[in-house]
Image: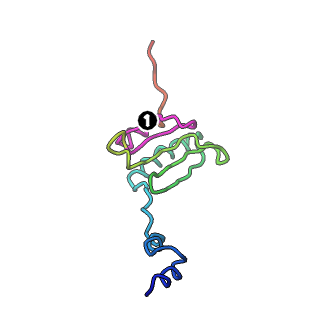
Amino acid sequence: MSEGEDDERTGGRGVVDALAAFRPRPADVHFDRRELSAILSVYGRKVAEGEWRDYALDFDPEEAVFSIFRRSSEQPLYRIVKKPALARRQGAYAVLATGGYILRRGHDLRQVLLALDRGLRLVKA
């Protein structure tokens, strides 16, 4: 096989470039069953109270996002983000508000979800 034949088959690209097109892409980050159960528990309570009505799940190689909507035509009220790359630093989980404000970040998802599940509290004067 001569160099001219190689260029002809790969369209002028080298063999390395041709093989790069067939590399598997990295796996997407997902919520596991335990994490999804904790998220849906909070979500179900808020739906029953009439506060939230819709959600969306987004997955890519760096993060998984659970978005919560009051109406499906609006921007998400909250986003629950799982970023394993931040697991050793700030924690893999974060709850973000509409403007991108971080409400809570941490290593334990149940503790992070407490930012969404605030109830009424008795305040003594």
Residue at (52, 53) in percent of width and height: 57
Q: Nearer the viewer, residue 74 or 22?
A: 22
Query: How far across and down, in percent of the image, does residue 78 sit?
Result: 54, 41
Residue 91 colored magenta?
no
Q: Would you say 34 lies left or right of 54 here?
A: left
Q: Nearer the viewer, residue 54 or 3?
A: 3
Q: Which residue is mark 1?
A: 104
- Decide: few, some or many residues near mark 1? Use Cα within 10 Å; few <14, some 14-19, many ≥20: some
Query: How far across and down, in percent of the image, does residue 55 sit?
Result: 56, 49
Q: Which residues are magenta?
A: 92-115
Residue 100 colored magenta?
yes
Query: How far across and down, in percent of the image, does residue 89 sit?
Result: 34, 40
Q: Looking at the image, is 57 positioned above or below residue 1?
A: above
* Residue kind at label 1, given as amino acid type: Arg
Q: Looking at the image, is 3 positioned above or below residue 78?
A: below
Q: Nearer the viewer, residue 5 or 35?
A: 5
Query: How far across and down, in percent of the image, does residue 119 sit?
Result: 48, 31
Number of callouts in the render? 1
In the rendered image, the quadrant that contains the N terminus is: bottom left
Q: Would you say 99 lies left or right of 36 here?
A: right
